[in-house]
Each structure stands twice: as structure tokens, then as C-alpha cells.
Amino acid sequence: MQKNNIKGCFILTFASLIWGLAFVVQNDASNLISPFAFNSSRSLLGALVIFIFLFVKSKLRHEKIFKNDKSYIKSTVIGGIVCGIFLAFSVNFQQLGISVYPDNCAAEARAGFITALYVILVPIVSITLKKKTPPIVWLAVMIALLGIYYLCLSQGLSGIYLGDILMLFCALSCTIHILFVDKFGGIIDGPLLSFVQFLVCGIISGVISVIFEPQTTIQNIYSALPQILYMGILSSGLAYTLQIIGQRYAEPAVASIFMSLESVFASLGGWIIMGNKLSPRELLGCALVFVAIIIAQIPEFFKKTAN
């Protein structure tokens, strides 16, 4: 069991690396293509990649992709649409935020750590669903707020960027998205739910792009093709598959901790690849947010250990 847990952690770490470096890719893409057009392209490509996975799996197992069950199909459609809507909010707030960060402000690190606050927001928002929130989570919240202070507010209100605010909206959207995935994921096949939500997200982003981004051309899409391929094939298709495989081996609490490494890889990627350096105060802020993320996982870790 321990070997399997270690194997799962390695797999999930690789998935987190892909997601973390995605922030660098997104920042690069923001200079080449408008946000909604980018998210539409990457989401539709991600849906295609996952559909190919579903098709191959159905052939190998000699089963249909869609079950002949009206109730199941209805749940898949409703769940996919709801999750797709909040996924669209998440990815578009994120891409808009990255695109408006000023140069040389370590956008990848700030975006990665603020987005990762969903790990803390999930149990807090769960209170509205009448779920108990362990006291230690509130400690994590206070540490996270202190981290955000050093990351974004240590220089006063002038240190807050519009991108930071949009990232907070992204984190909140991610929170709601995770809660709906939890709701529908128990009754719908994971990859199938992901396919529908990426399809819905791609369509929503595409419609908004057509209306509000008339400046987008085929040339813009072509110029950002490497970034779109990375986000669609690796970040959406491969990393999602790795997450499914990794969670088969690793305990859920352990898995969530390793998946939260995404924010660390985002910061490292921005520093090594883009040359964006964080100030000592910003580094302290990132460290505090990451500590808060780990602390927020402790109740689930001990719950699984006890079981």
C-alpha cells in the first residue's frame, strides 16, 4: 500500500508540474491572443482529447460511451452544463487576470498562489451546505490572509493589482466548481463529466469571444497554437488523466496536498523560465499561503488515517 501511495504521489506531482507551468504558458499566450478566444480554443481541444480517451476506453472495454439510461444521460447533461458554466467563470477570470498584470510583477506566482486559495475556500463555503468546518481550517484562513497581505498588500493598496482581484474571483469560481463536481462526480463517470464541462466551457467562451473580441483573427489563434496545444492536450487532457490514475493509488488527503504543489511550480516556472523574481515580502506571502493550504488538508488527512 505504501509503494502504491508513493507511486500515486509521483504521478500527481507530475500533473501538478503540468498545471503549474500552465501559468507560464497562459502568461505568454496573453500577449498573443485575447482571453476568451484562448480559453475557447483550449477548452474545445481539451474536450476533443478527453473524447478520444473515452472512445479508446469504450473500444477496449467493449462498452458504449453514453449509457442507455435516460436518467443517467439527464444527470450527465445537467451536471456537465452546470460544471461547465463555473469552469468557464474560473478559466476566464484567471486568463483575464493574468493578461492585465503589469510586466515584471511575477504574475505566474501571484496567480498560482491566489488561485490555490480554493483549497481553503471549499470548506468555508461548505458551511452554507450545512457541512461542519474543523476549527483548524479557520487557522488556515488566518494564515492565508496574512500571506495575501504580504503577497499583495505589504506596500499598501497601491500593491493590489486588478489581476489579484480577478484571481480572487477565479478562486471563488473554482470553489463553486469543485463543489458541483463533488455533487455530480459521484453519479457520473469522471472523464465523461469532464468532456461535457470542457465542451460547455469552450462554447461559452467562444460565444463571448465572438461578441466582445471582434479583433481576434485566425492569425491570432495560429500564433498562439503552441500555447493552445499545451493547455488543451497537456493541461486538460493528460494532467486530468494523470490525476485520475494518481488518485487510484494515493489517499485523497495526500493527493490534495501534492496537487496543491501546482502553485509552487507556477512560482518556480515564472522565476526560471520568465525571469520574474519575487521580493522577500512576496516570497514570505507565497510561503504563508502554501502553509495555509497544507494546514487546510490536515483534518481530511487524519480522518482518512483513522479509517
Image (cartoon, rainbow, N blue to C red):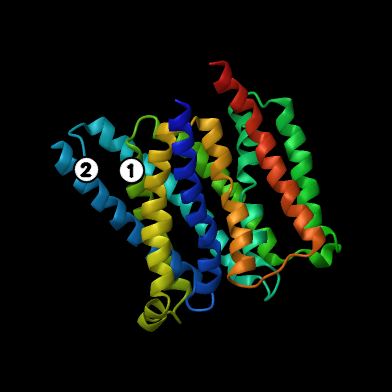
Looking at the image, is mark 2 or mark 1 earlier in the sequence? 2
Of the residues shown, which amino acid type is indicated by label 2?
Lys
Report the residue marked by disc 2.
57
Which corner quadrant of the image does residue 258 belong to? top right
Q: Secondary structure at mark 2?
A: helix
Residue drawn at the location 82% of the way across and 59% of the way down: 281
Q: Which mark is residue 180?
A: none
Of the residues shown, which amino acid type is indicated by label 1?
Pro
Q: Position of residue 111 (x, y in %)?
A: 63, 59
In the rendered structure, the answer to whether residue 64 lies left or right of residue 195 reads left
Circle 1 Cα neighbour tier, 10 Å, few/some/many (<14 / 14–19 / ≥20):
some
Q: Is residue 38 above or below residue 200?
A: below
Q: Position of residue 137 (x, y in %)?
A: 70, 32
Q: Position of residue 122 (x, y in %)?
A: 60, 37
Q: Nearer the viewer, mark 2 or mark 1?
A: 2
Q: Is residue 159 above or below residue 183?
A: below
Q: Position of residue 138 (x, y in %)?
A: 74, 33
Report the residue marked by disc 1.
191
